[in-house]
């Protein structure tokens, strides 16, 4: 009797334990499966941080969701660096090809540490948030080769760069290095070292450049944030083409080189994520003389623009025949959104065109440290991608007068934009990013791979409206997506505020983000189609 009684008690106890274990297991499974892998891969950083804090998901789960997408959509990449991609058309055909090498082993370790930090309450501002790092930003132990065969065996970096230091300090996880155009010298991202990077929205078209891998990785859901640099539009072009937000800070806001044409900045799928990342990376650095003190703080929310004047320029005179219908329509969409937000739209046109601006800009740029890129070009001509060789025309016969001409053009441009925009009381200027969104992914790899605007073929350098604000480098510029074209390629616009007046550019972008239907929501995701 006693033996039977104790047996019943023991069985009841064991059943209770099993029920408890099953319930807790079911709860764990429920928590892990509350979001799909796609949801986790694309979820904004600001939302992820809230979920991490609540224990509703973890950095490790997000990382694995994104790694799964890399394996599915990116295609081959090689840590050892290939000697040469011989067939651009066939290497990684039908894949995004946005990554040079991955850091997944270390990333998994850091993600587990981030999981624990959220559990014990020691999480930092970007704890566990994945970041794709452009093949220009120095990460300790990573090689920067600028997609060049000449540099493929370059020594790995022995320390983090200034921006990377700030991101690492706040708990960001560097998951992989992203592809670039060779020596950062093309508005599309392809090279003989890494092949062609392709747009996740439509693989026939390019990702932009030179931060094209960063833009494509974000669009494909491979990471949550990404780094970019901008010396002629290298943040804004891929932001526009991949449907993400990018910010070209004014020179000195983020620690970079002493080249006044260049700046570093954030790239993200949402306005809020761009702001979060910029707030982390901004500020002075003991390593870079030109960074500005004190640090500017970037809030998440901004005052409405109702009643504020905002200038809009279609840049009808940039090309003789005007810009593409897609670029014009994107400005139409921005104008409608500005009016819906209550802004007073002031239409203006600046006294500038591609034919007069671009040669002077490039010659001025090449009189800076960029000139060093062309050292040894004669001896190693066969190792460079075609677009690097093509730009030799700007660097071959430089004189001090070329820098003087660029400075004179800057004075004229600055006076023009001040008189027509900011002295008239406008808080920002909204303008096109590109003359067309339709650039073949392997632009200029062969003579037939060219971009056209209204039936006419142009040099790619004439189709970028971004270098204006690298010459006038003290102007902050936000690039934001406004719509998808008929060929499913995103189209963005630039929002330019007055010199070092970053927050008004953010204010206008914030207002537009509230009235323009966002990408990466409600079924508006890349579908990896491949259609000309």
Image (spheres, helix red, strand yellow):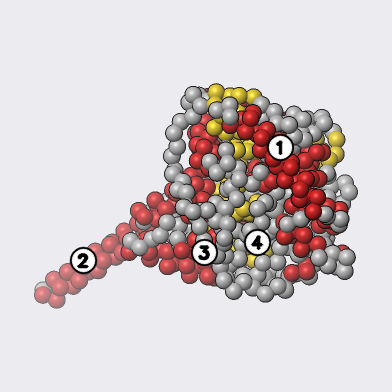
Q: Secondary structure at mark 3?
A: loop
> Mark 3 = which residue?
286
Estimate the x, y position of residue 488 in percent, counting from the top left: 68, 39
Task: Look at the image and tell me whether residue 59 can be seen.
Answer: no
Q: Residue at 44% x, 44% y: name it.
A: 299
Q: Earlier in the sequence, mark 3 or mark 4?
A: 4
Q: Nearer the viewer, mark 1 or mark 3?
A: 1
| Mark 2 neighbour class, 10 Å CA radius: few under 14, some 14 to 19, many 20 or more | few
Q: In the displayed structure, does residue 187 sit left or right of residue 307?
A: right
Q: Earlier in the sequence, mark 2 or mark 3?
A: 2
Q: Earlier in the sequence, mark 4 or mark 2?
A: 2
Task: Look at the image and tell me whether residue 135 can be seen.
Answer: yes
Say if mark 2 contacts mark 1, CB within 8 Å. Answer: no
Which quadrant of the view contains residue 490? top right
Q: Nearer the viewer, mark 4 or mark 2?
A: 4
Label 2 to label 1: alpha-carbon separation: 87 Å
Label 3 to label 4: alpha-carbon separation: 20 Å
Label 2 to label 3: alpha-carbon separation: 67 Å
Q: Earlier in the sequence, mark 4 or mark 1?
A: 4
| Mark 4 neighbour class, 10 Å CA radius: few under 14, some 14 to 19, many 20 or more | many
Q: Secondary structure at mark 1?
A: helix
Q: Nearer the viewer, residue 319 or 423?
A: 423
Is the residue 106 above or below the residue 406 in the image?
A: below
> Mark 2 = which residue?
12
Q: Residue at 57% x, 60% y: name it.
A: 289
Q: Earlier in the sequence, mark 1 or mark 3?
A: 3
Label 4 to label 2: alpha-carbon separation: 64 Å
Q: Secondary structure at mark 4?
A: loop
Q: Nearer the viewer, mark 4 or mark 1?
A: 1
């Amino acid at each position: 009797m006693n033996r039977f009684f104790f047996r019943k008690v023991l069985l009841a106890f064991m059943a209770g334990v099993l029920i408890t274990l099953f319930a807790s297991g079911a709860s764990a499974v429920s928590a892990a499966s509350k979001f799909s892998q796609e949801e986790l891969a694309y979820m904004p950083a600001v939302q992820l941080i809230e979920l991490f804090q609540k224990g509703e998901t973890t950095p490790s789960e997000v990382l694995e969701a994104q790694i799964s997408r890399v394996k599915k959509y990116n295609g081959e990449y090689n840590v050892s660096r290939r000697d040469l991609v011989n067939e651009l058309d066939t290497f990684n055909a039908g894949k995004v090809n946005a990554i040079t090498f991955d850091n997944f082993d270390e990333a998994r370790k850091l993600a587990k540490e981030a999981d624990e930090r959220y559990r014990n309450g020691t999480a930092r501002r970007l704890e566990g948030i994945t970041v794709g790092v452009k093949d220009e930003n120095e990460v300790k132990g990573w090689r920067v080769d600028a997609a060049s065969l000449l540099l493929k065996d370059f020594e790995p970096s022995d320390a983090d760069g200034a921006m990377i230091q700030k991101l690492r300090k706040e708990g960001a996880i560097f998951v992989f290095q992203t592809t670039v155009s060779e020596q950062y010298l093309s508005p599309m991202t392809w090279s003989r070292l890494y092949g062609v990077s392709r747009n996740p929205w439509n693989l026939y078209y390019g990702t932009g450049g030179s931060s094209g891998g960063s833009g494509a990785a974000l669009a494909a859901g491979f990471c949550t944030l990404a780094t970019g640099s901008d010396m002629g539009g290298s943040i804004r072009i891929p932001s526009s083409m991949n449907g993400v937000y990018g910010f070209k800070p004014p020179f000195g806001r983020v620690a970079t080189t002493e080249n006044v044409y260049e700046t570093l900045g954030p790239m993200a799928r949402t306005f809020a994520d761009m702001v979060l990342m910029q707030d982390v990376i901004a500020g002075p650095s003991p390593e870079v003389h030109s960074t500005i003190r004190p640090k500017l703080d970037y809030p998440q929310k901004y005052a409405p623009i109702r009643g504020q004047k905002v200038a809009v320029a279609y840049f009808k005179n940039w090309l003789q025949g005007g810009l593409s219908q897609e670029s014009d329509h994107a400005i139409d969409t921005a104008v409608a959104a500005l009016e819906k937000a209550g802004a007073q739209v002031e239409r203006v046109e600046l006294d500038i065109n591609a034919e007069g601006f671009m040669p002077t800009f490039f010659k001025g740029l090449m009189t800076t440290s960029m000139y060093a890129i062309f050292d040894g070009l004669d001896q190693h001509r066969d190792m460079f991608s075609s677009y690097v060789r093509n730009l030799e025309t700007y660097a071959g016969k430089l004189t001090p007068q070329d820098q003087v001409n660029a400075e004179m053009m800057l004075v004229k441009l600055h006076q023009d934009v001040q008189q027509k925009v900011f002295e008239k009381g406008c808080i920002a200027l909204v303008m096109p990013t590109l003359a067309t969104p339709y650039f073949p992914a392997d632009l200029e790899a062969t003579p037939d791979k060219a971009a056209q605007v209204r039936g006419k073929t142009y040099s790619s350098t004439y189709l970028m409206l971004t270098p204006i604000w690298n010459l006038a480098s003290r102007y902050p510029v936000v690039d934001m997506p406004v719509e998808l074209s008929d060929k499913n390629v995103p189209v963005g616009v630039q929002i330019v505020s007055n010199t070092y007046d970053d927050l008004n550019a953010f204010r206008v972008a914030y207002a537009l983000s509230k009235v323009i239907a966002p990408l990466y929501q409600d079924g508006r995701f890349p579908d990896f189609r491949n259609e000309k």
